[in-house]
Amino acid sequence: MRASELDVGDVSQVARTGAVPPGRDIDELVAAAHARGLRHAEGTVADYIPILAQADPELFGLCVVDVDGGVHEVGDTGARFSIQSISKAFVYALLCDALGHEEVFDVVGVNNTGAAFNSVVAIELNEGHPGNPMVNAGAIATTALMPGATAEEKWEGVRGGLSRFAGRELEVDDDVYESETLTNQRNRAIAQLLQSYDRIRSDPAEAVDVYTRQCSLLVDAHDLAVMGATLADGGVNPVTGERVVSADVCRDTLAVLAASGLYERSGEWLFEIGLPGKSGVAGGLVTVAPGKAGIGAYAPRLDSAGNSVRGQIGTAYLSRALGLNIFASEPH
C-alpha cells in the first residue's frame, strides 16, 4: 500500500533512537492508530480457505508490547484467529537456532522471489531452490528440516517453540486444520516438487501436514505483539523472561522479514513503514521494531496480496508517530 492508501499523509515521521516513549504516550498513540484504521473498510476477507470467509470483517485489534514487557492495546486484541503464514517467521527462527546460519541459508535461501506466496513457477525458475522461508515452498522446506525423527516430534517442536514465543500454550483450531487439509493440493504439489530437487528428504506429505497444523494454531493480536517483542528483545520473551532463540537468530529472522515478509508487496512495505513484518491471510500482522517493541494487529479484510488493510494502516501510523522506522533520521 502507498502512503496515500495508508492514510498517514498528515502524520509526521519522528526519528527516535533508543527506547520507546513512556507508556502513557504509547497508549494514546495506539488508540489514535486504532481509530485511524477504523475509518477504512477496504479489502476483502480471504475465502480460498473456506473457513476463513466466516471471519467478522469488522474486527480490529492493535497491540504494542515493548521490550520491557509493557502492554498497550486497543480493540479486539483478544479475538483469536489462525496464525497462518505468520508462523513461517517463528518456525524459521527455531530452525536457525537448531541448525545454524549456514545450513538454513543453503537449503532455504533468503532472496525475495517477486512472485506470489504459493508460486510453483518460482521454484522451477530457481532450479528447485525455494527462494526464502516466507513463501510456501521455503516454509514447507523449513518445517521439513525441523529436528525430530518423526512428523509428530517435528510438530511438537513447532508447537512448543511458537508457544514459548507467545508466552502461553498455543492450540490448533481443528476446523481450520480440516478446512486447509481439504484445500492444500497446491502445497502438496510444491512439497513433491521440492522433493524431486532434493530440497526435502523426508516424506513430503508429512511435511505438508505439519506445516498445515502450524498455520492452524490459534493466536490473537496480543500474542503476535509478544512474539514480535521477543524477536525485538534479542530472543528473550519480555513477558515471561524466557530465552527462546539467540540474538543472532533474531537478526537473521528480521533481515528475512524485511526482504520478504509481506509477499510481493515487501518492497512497498519497507519503503513506507520501514520495519520487518509478517502477514497472514486470516488477517494477522506482526511487526518488529528491533530493540524497542513488537506490534500485533488483527483485521480480516485483506489487500490483493493477502495483507491486512487496517493492520497496515494502524502499523504505519505507529511507525511514524512512535519513531520506529529504522531508516528515519533527523539532522543532529
Image: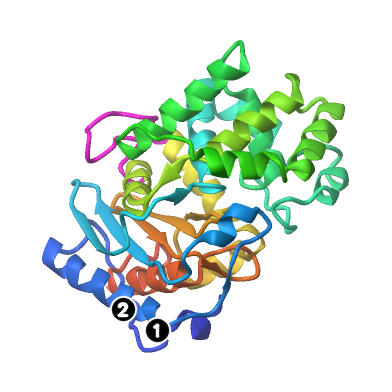
* Residue 192, above or below 288: above
Residue 329 can be seen in this image: no
**Residue 267 drawn in magenta:** no
Q: What is the three-letter code of the residue carrying label 1? A: Arg
Q: Is residue 187 depicted above or below 225 in this figure? A: above
Q: Position of residue 215 (x, y in %)?
A: 55, 41
Residue at 39%, 60% in the rendered image: 297
Q: Residues within 10 Å of mark 1 (few under 14, many from 20)?
A: few
Q: Give the range drawn in magenta.
A: 232-248
Q: Is mark 1 on a helix, strand or loop?
A: loop
Q: Is mark 2 on a helix, strand or loop?
A: helix
Q: Residue at x 31, y 78 (%)?
A: 35
Disc on res. 39: 1
Disc 2: CA contacts within 10 A as few (<14), some (14-19) or many (>=20): some
User: Which residue is denoted by mark 2 in the rendering?
Assistant: 35
Seen at 50% across and 28% down, the residue is 158
Which quadrant is the N terminus positioned in? bottom right
